Amino acid sequence: MKQALLPAGWIKPRGYANGVAASGTQVFIAGQIGWDEQAQFRTTDFAAQAIQALKNVVAVLHEAGGKPEHLVRMTWYVTDKREYLAALKDIGRAFRELIGDYDIAMSAVQVVALIEDEAKVEIEATAVIPQ
């Protein structure tokens, strides 16, 4: 079970939840970047890397028997805030297709660099699979 948390009087956030309450098996997904299953980057495009990173999150979650609707938290690390903002339309479309649920506590942080030089985005996630 998962429930988005919205304190009384607060405006509903767009594209994320302020908090999420959930019970079940917890799954912690390490930061996923925009490379494929063979650890190869196929593009330098920010949106394409973000979409691949989301696909990687879903693949790891699937290994635990989870589904995208079980995600409760995501942290996005981006190397360029402007690139991220410019790609939001494409990322949003892919997010709706791959994840489908914005009742996820999310943060986005600009960082100086990621460990893999070609990476433009890294996404770590937490899911709770109901019992």
Image (spheres, rainbow, N blue to C red):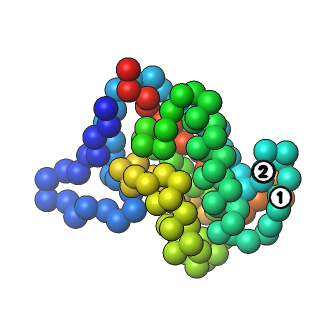
Residue 66 against residue 8 in the figure, above or below? above
- Please name the residue that numbered disc 2 is placed on: 36
Mark 2 or mark 1, earlier in chain: 2
Between 104 and 19, the residue placed more toward the observer is 104
Find residue 72 and report its horizontal and vertical position in percent.
42, 41
Residue 59 x/y as whole percent: 63, 40
Q: In this view, does 73 lie to the left or right of 13?
A: right
Amino acid under disc 1: Phe
Element at badge 1?
Answer: loop
Q: Can residue 112 be seen in this view?
A: no
Kindly identify the residue that appears in the image at 71 percent across and 52 percent down: 33
Q: Are marks 2 and 1 in contact (CB under 8 Å)?
A: yes
Place residue 124 in its image quadrant: top right
- Residue at 62% in and 56% down: 77
Which image quarter is the C terminus in? top left
At x 22%, y 64%, the residue is 11
Location of residue 30 (image quadrant): top right
- At numbered mark 2, what does the secondary structure look like: helix, strand or loop? loop
Tell me: residue 21, above or below residue 26.
Answer: below
Q: Residue type at mark 2: give it.
A: Asp
Residue 39 percent coordinates (x, y): 84, 47
In this view, 33 is above or below 92: above
Report which residue position mark 1 lands on: 41
**Distance between mark 2 and mark 1 Cα atoms:** 6 Å
Specify the quadrant that holds the N terminus. Answer: top left
